Image (tube, grey):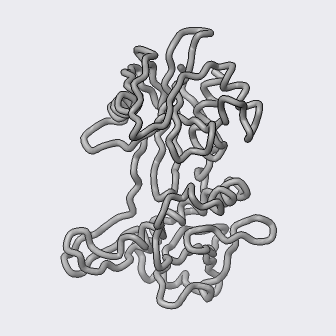
Amino acid sequence: MPAATILPIAFAGSPLDRADHIRTDPDGLAGLMNWRARLLLLDGLNPAMDESGRLAWGTLADAPEQCDLVFLGFDEGKACFAAVPEQGATGPAYADPRVWSAMQLLSAPDLAVYGGARSLVDWHARHRFCARCGAATKLAKGGWQRDCEACGASHFPRTDPVTIMLVMHGEGADRRLLLGRQPRFPERIYSALAGFVEPGETIEEAVAREVQEEAGVAVENVTYIASQPWPFPSQLMIGCHATALSDALTIDETELEDARWFTRAELEAAREAGPDGTELLVFPRKEAIAHHLVTWWLEQ
């Protein structure tokens, strides 16, 4: 299949200038922390929104006392910061309806700003101590690093790579897509199979391993389609396409509640039906890369 350009995609396309050169300039950063600076207002890790449904911003005077501030970048010449909360994420984001509501209400630029900020402040809240020696660490480089004065180690915000893949079987009008559902999914929602890239493997190897492990299907011809930052807590979803060598399924029930092959007609009907879907299937949410991947496949 041809390469894809899928835009826009949720949590991508931040309008902020990250201004890397400022991060390494302590005096320059300190000079930005004035009355003109903007503070992204958060309710824990959830976004605060104004009356117009946009991200709410305040000044640095709105930050909690003695909290760490991370430098997000510049927006129209104004320095933007976010405060590190006392506690990081304690449970899955999908369990909080406020997260899904915000994802549907925020504009694409606002969602991208929020996603980047959430990942960063959550990482700081959960990594206050050195992984090497256990001593307390200090924020550095405007929040894009933490340093341990006890042993000299430096720690950096991490992004975990996750493959998410469309698996196709058949030719021409007989082509079908393999989708699965986890037990936590709402009823009738199916999505592309996904899994973390493990140490010592390529993206292509991760795709093949995950599909084999979860559905018992061997694949070939793995190709890249598109990617999406996913700030729950901080992942990079790497969208791929692969061809199945067989349509026989052996489902790993510790990973999936169900997996099945869907025809183009079934997927088209679910997409046309909207949020309620059909009796068989609810199309993946538009905020998730799976929505864009399946849409891309249908439009080939």
Q: Position of residue 231 (x, y in %)?
A: 51, 57
Residue drawn 62% across the image and 29% down it: 296
Vertical side of 235 occupied by 209: above or below: above
Q: Position of residue 45 (x, y in %)?
A: 55, 69
From the viewer's perspective, is 42 left or right of 260?
A: right
Vertical side of 262 occupied by 295: above or below: below
Would you identify the image quadrant in which residue 34 lies?
A: bottom right
Name the residue nearer the viewer: 275 or 142: 275
Q: Position of residue 263 (x, y in %)?
A: 62, 19
Quadrant where the image shows the C terminus: top right
Query: Is residue 126 visible in the rendered structure shown here?
Result: yes
Count of numbered tags: 0
Query: Is residue 28 visible in the rendered structure shown here?
Result: no
Vertical side of 253 occupied by 131: above or below: below
Q: Position of residue 257 (x, y in %)?
A: 48, 37
Residue drawn 47% across the image and 66% down it: 89
Residue drawn 32% across the image and 35% down it: 202
Name the residue nearer the viewer: 88 or 185: 185
Q: Residue furthest right?
A: 52
Name the residue nearer the viewer: 187 or 53: 187
Residue drawn 39% across the image and 70% down it: 126
From the viewer's perspective, is 81 left or right of 154?
A: right
